[in-house]
Image (cartoon, grey):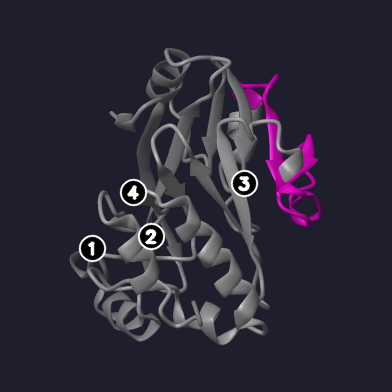
Amino acid sequence: MTQLEPIGKDIWIVDGGEIRFLGLRLGTRSTIIRLTDGTVWVHSPVQLSRALAEQIDGIGPVRYLIAPNLYHHLFLKEWQEHYPDAQVIGPQGLAEKRPDIEFSGVLADPESDPWRADIERVIFTGSRAFDEHVFFHRASSTAILTDLIVNLRLENQSPIGRLIARIEGVAFPEGRTPLLYRLGMRQRGEGAQAVRAMLAWEPRQVVISHGEWFREGASDQLRKRFNWLPI
């Protein structure tokens, strides 16, 4: 059974099944936060099961379903159907990509976020590929990233996957921003500005969506994984 793992005050993670992307097997991970008003905020939903829904219902009523970039939308529809009162919020352009999902809003100015009393946000921009919205849960001192850092164990990959992971620079324990994303940066200064904002949070830990995440030394890990930027 898929189990929620508590990782701090009012925050849990849950690992979902694998997806295939560009020859790699990618595990999926969602972060669940109980806000101070008792409602639940879900980042990058993984595949929903009855057992997982029961666990989440034990935390509180789901209010927000968050897609942090244009690629983390695969399971939003089933969550919306199960939690019809939840607000589905994603980046600019996702509503056009997924017209089957009814979006409540877009991730625009972080100052307008209804959850900003609990969770901060910065926008990592500057890439031709996509922008990513990065979050920080104050109560647990947790930074929440999606695809900006990937850190995959090679034993879970096919021979071709292991080669791709090494070329892309996403092999554990040295995984960082995938090479294709780095090559697509048109404005490295914008990316560096976002990383400096992450470092200013002084996070205790960093959750990522794919691969081994960082339970300690978060600021050092961010500096190491983003050393390709002028931070």
Between the C-alphas of marks 4 and 2, the distance is 21 Å
In this rendering, the answer to whether 106 lies above or below 2 is below
Residue 168 belongs to magenta span? no
Q: Amino acid at mark 2?
A: Leu
Q: Are marks 3 and 4 in contact (CB under 8 Å)?
A: no
Q: Are marks 4 and 2 in contact (CB under 8 Å)?
A: no
Res 71 → quadrant: bottom right
Work out whether mark 3 precedes mark 2 in sequence or the reverse, and give the earlier one. 2
Between the C-alphas of marks 3 and 4, the distance is 21 Å
> Which segment did they paint magenta?
81-110
In this rendering, the answer to whether 63 lies above or below 189 is above
Mark 2 is surrounded, within 10 Å at the Cα level, by few (under 14), some (14 to 19) or many (20 or more) other residues, namely many
Query: In the rendered picture of this protein, how many numbered marks are placed on residues?
Result: 4
Q: Which residue is mark 3?
A: 67
Work out whether mark 1 precedes mark 3 in sequence or the reverse, and give the earlier one. 3
| Camera-side mark, 1 or 4 | 4
- Closer to the camera, 98 or 184? 184
Res 58 → quadrant: top left
Kind of element beneath mark 3:
loop
| Camera-side mark, 3 or 2 | 3
Image location (x, y in percent) of residue 159: 24, 78
Q: Which residue is mark 2?
A: 26
Work out whether mark 2 precedes mark 1 in sequence or the reverse, and give the earlier one. 2
Q: Which residue is mark 1?
A: 156
Mark 1 is surrounded, within 10 Å at the Cα level, by few (under 14), some (14 to 19) or many (20 or more) other residues, namely few
Image location (x, y in percent) of residue 43: 53, 40
Mark 4 is surrounded, within 10 Å at the Cα level, by few (under 14), some (14 to 19) or many (20 or more) other residues, namely many
Image location (x, y in percent) of residue 79: 59, 30
Q: Which residue is mark 4?
A: 205
> Residue at left 33%, top 47%?
204
Kind of element beneath mark 2:
strand
